Image (spheres, rainbow, N blue to C red):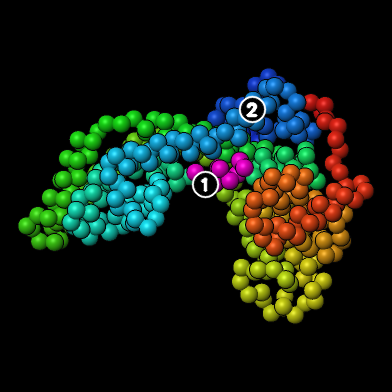
Amino acid sequence: MVQFGLRSLGCLLLVAIASAGPRAGDGALAPDGKRGFGPEASLTETLAIVRATHEADQQFLKELDGLPSEVEVLSTAALERYRQRGYLKLVERSKEASLALVHAELKATLEHPFEALGDGARGELAAKLVCDVRLRLRARVLANLVLPTKELHNALAVLRGATNGLVLLSTADVRCIAVRADLAASELRALRSDLLALRQSGGEAEIDTRAQGLIDLVRASEGEPVRRAGLERELAELQALEDGMAASLFSERLRTEQHELFEWRQRLFEESVPLRDEALLWLPDGEQPSKPPRDVERLSKSERMRGAGARSFSALALDPLDVDACWVAAHSSDFIYGITESRTWYDRFLALRGIRAHDHRTYADRKLDAREREALDAVQRALLGPGSGQPTNPPVRGQ
């Protein structure tokens, strides 16, 4: 099983490299044609970019770091429009208003539209929600926000951990991370463009007219089957309108044009996650996702640690950004080999959690969980010991 996963990753990575976009002069391009790390950059070249000793690299990293907040600003502006339209009245007063909660109301309404739209004044407001096609498109766009945000954060965190900490990466690791960082950045730029296009106001009169039509259908004097059928037809028309407009979204076009890259990333998760879950099951002293098999429970602690470690390394060979697999690799390595082997995995785990052992600001005001405390203690011990540091001289670009 593990061997098959590693072989198939090689094929998938070739697809990713072929699909990730061309090189332009000395600068690699991301899938959307903007500057990226590139799928063919060497380890030293990629880490030189992250060290940002050149102004162009500093600007590149600044733009990447700012992408999530730019999307957040646009989301906040959309929430204000929802407030003006009265949609926030659909959210429970005990909960803080958010786009996610409003979009959840849309989903709930569409799951049981006849009942939701028949609920008096609340139903009338829900009808406007359903007929607001820009809102529906915005919900569609933001449903894809979490993964690229996480991917970009994790990729940059690990690459920076290799320049200012104890994280060690292979060339294969860096190429996988670079492709994923470029894809995530392309996604976020596309989402930003979508939200900019959808922020245009207007169309309220049309929304109100369509919504009143839905309410009239629900309240008509015909029998319930007739009213339900009429409502179903109107909702199908709205869905067709949404789908037609969605085809022009930047994010939808990116997914179509770069479908091989998206499929590669999905298959990477499909192969790595089962290995990661197996590794967690084998840990003798961890929080397992489910009860381990009896033959695993009968093994000694040392045997289980070795088994957990082997499976975590296989998972990390596929997905070097998996925080749980990284934890298992660190914890099991520390038990079997000691801090010399475990420190790089502990530091990668901390990087993925947003903690840097040399920067007190990254953990001073947060309550560390047991894993974070163990990892931080281990890395700080390693930093105080001899021969624990990363090379401090930056590599020459292009090596």
The image quadrant where one finds the C terminus is top right
Gap between marks 1 and 2, in whole Å?
A: 22 Å
Dot 2: element: helix
Residue at mark 2: 60
Which segment did they paint magenta? 145-153
Task: Report the front residue among 99 and 335.
Answer: 99
Tell me: 339 left or right of 162.
right
Image position, residue 302 (x, y; %)? 82, 71
Task: Report the front residue among 182 and 324.
Answer: 324
Indicate which disc, 1 or 2, sits on the residue closer to the N terminus.
Answer: 2
The answer to whether the residue labelled 1 contacts the one labelled 2, judged by CB atoms less than 8 Å apart, is no
Q: Residue at x 24, y 57 (%)?
A: 116
- 150 in relation to 39, above or below: below
Q: Residue at x 59, y 55 (%)?
A: 270
Residue at mark 1: 146
Res 283 quadrant in image: bottom right
Res 202 quadrant in image: top left
The chief SS type of the magenta part is helix
Q: Residues within 10 Å of mark 1 (few under 14, many from 20)?
A: few
Please say whether residue 147 is one of the residues in the magenta stretch.
Answer: yes
